[in-house]
Image: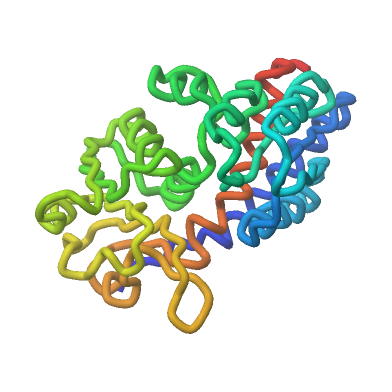
């Protein structure tokens, strides 16, 4: 029976650490602040914005939500982002996705200052990730590594297989794992004989967005399994990309859904806000 890698419990402890860091900045006259822009009324986006507000409040980071109507002009949105870029009181900026179809997602995201891009979506930060230099990186891949680190699971020398090549998890995580000296294979839903690849993994990361894609027979006995999927579950709630109950009988350690990577992501986003403060102001303040 696999060890459960409890992201929810870890997040509680990390938020206490973040609170202490925020208090240290405040004592130096700097109040870390995150501003989120929500365009339209997408239910998922509203839920994510509310979660950010709640966690920011818990750790003492100031939070502001800017709402624009679903018919907002692109120039209005870009102008709002430009104003936030110029506001020295704002340290982190996020634009909630998805955007309404009439808005150019690439242009909007590229309008965010790289130093305030706490979601790690700007091309400059993606380039820094590839180059191995300092920058702001996506919170979900960081959450995967943080869970492994906090449970004492070293990835150096491991064969890590990632199922998913998306911009949010798969691609950035592959680079982060390479930096940690793992050997990385990236697969996806069109990979031929996917199971032949996944059965070679010491560390198997599911990030395809396909409920129950990873079954027990696809997992090498003793592998560590990290599930980043969030899919609608039959009867309500969410489920991951991994058939949890079956796979936990094979793996040595596994993240649950819910309660795993997703529980860590908003907390790691707040760590990115503090990282942004450092990048903008310097560690010495």
The answer to whether one can see residue 97 in this image is no
Q: Is residue 78 above or below residue 198?
A: above
Q: Percent from the top left, x then y, of residue 89?
A: 84, 26
Residue 243 placement: quadrant: bottom left
Residue 272 place in picture, x, y as percent: 62, 35
For the C terminus, the quadrant is top right
Query: Is residue 176 placed above or below 113 in the rendered structure?
Result: below
Number of numbered discs present? Answer: 0
Q: Quadrant of the N terminus?
A: bottom left
Q: Residue at x 71, y 45 (%)?
A: 71
123 relative position to 249: left or right = right
| Image vertical order of residue 31 relative to residue 234, above or below | above
Q: Of 217 and 78, which appears nearest the observer?
A: 78
- In the rendered image, the residue lying farthest to the bottom is 235
Looking at the image, what colour scheme do you see? Answer: rainbow
Q: Nearer the viewer, residue 28 or 170?
A: 170
Q: Position of residue 262 (x, y in %)?
A: 52, 57
| Viewer-closest of 81 and 138 | 81
Tell me if I can see residue 250 in this picture: yes
In the rendered image, residue 34, in percent from the top left (x then y), is placed at: 75, 37
Viewer-closest of 72 and 68: 72
Residue under the point 61% across and 46% down: 100
**Image point (78%, 53%), residue name:** 58
């Amino acid at each position: 029976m696999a060890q459960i890698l409890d992201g929810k419990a870890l997040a509680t402890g990390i938020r206490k650490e973040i609170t202490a860091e925020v208090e240290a900045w405040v004592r130096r006259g700097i109040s870390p602040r995150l501003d989120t822009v929500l365009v339209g009324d997408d239910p998922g986006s509203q839920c994510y914005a509310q979660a950010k507000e709640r966690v920011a409040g818990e750790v003492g980071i100031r939070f502001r939500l800017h709402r624009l109507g679903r018919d907002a002009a692109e120039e209005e949105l870009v102008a709002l982002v430009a104003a936030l870029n110029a506001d020295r009181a704002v340290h982190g900026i996020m634009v909630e996705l998805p955007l309404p179809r009439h808005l150019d997602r690439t242009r909007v995201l590229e309008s965010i200052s790289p130093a305030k891009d706490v979601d790690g979506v700007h091309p400059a930060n993606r380039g820094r990730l590839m180059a191995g230099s300092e920058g702001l990186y996506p919170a979900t891949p960081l959450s995967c590594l943080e869970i492994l680190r906090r449970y004492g699971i070293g990835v150096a020398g491991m064969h890590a297989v990632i199922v998913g090549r998306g911009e949010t998890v798969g691609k950035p995580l592959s680079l982060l794992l390479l930096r940690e000296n793992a050997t990385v294979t990236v697969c996806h839903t069109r990979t031929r004989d996917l199971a032949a690849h996944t059965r070679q993994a010491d560390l198997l990361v599911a990030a395809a967005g396909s409920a129950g894609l990873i079954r027990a027979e696809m997992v090498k006995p003793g592998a560590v399994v990290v599930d980043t999927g969030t899919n609608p579950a039959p009867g309500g709630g969410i489920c991951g990309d991994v058939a949890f109950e079956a796979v936990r009988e094979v793996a040595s350690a596994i993240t649950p859904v819910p309660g795993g990577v997703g529980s860590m992501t908003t907390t790691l986003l707040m760590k990115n806000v503090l990282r942004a403060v450092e990048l903008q102001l310097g560690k010495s303040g």
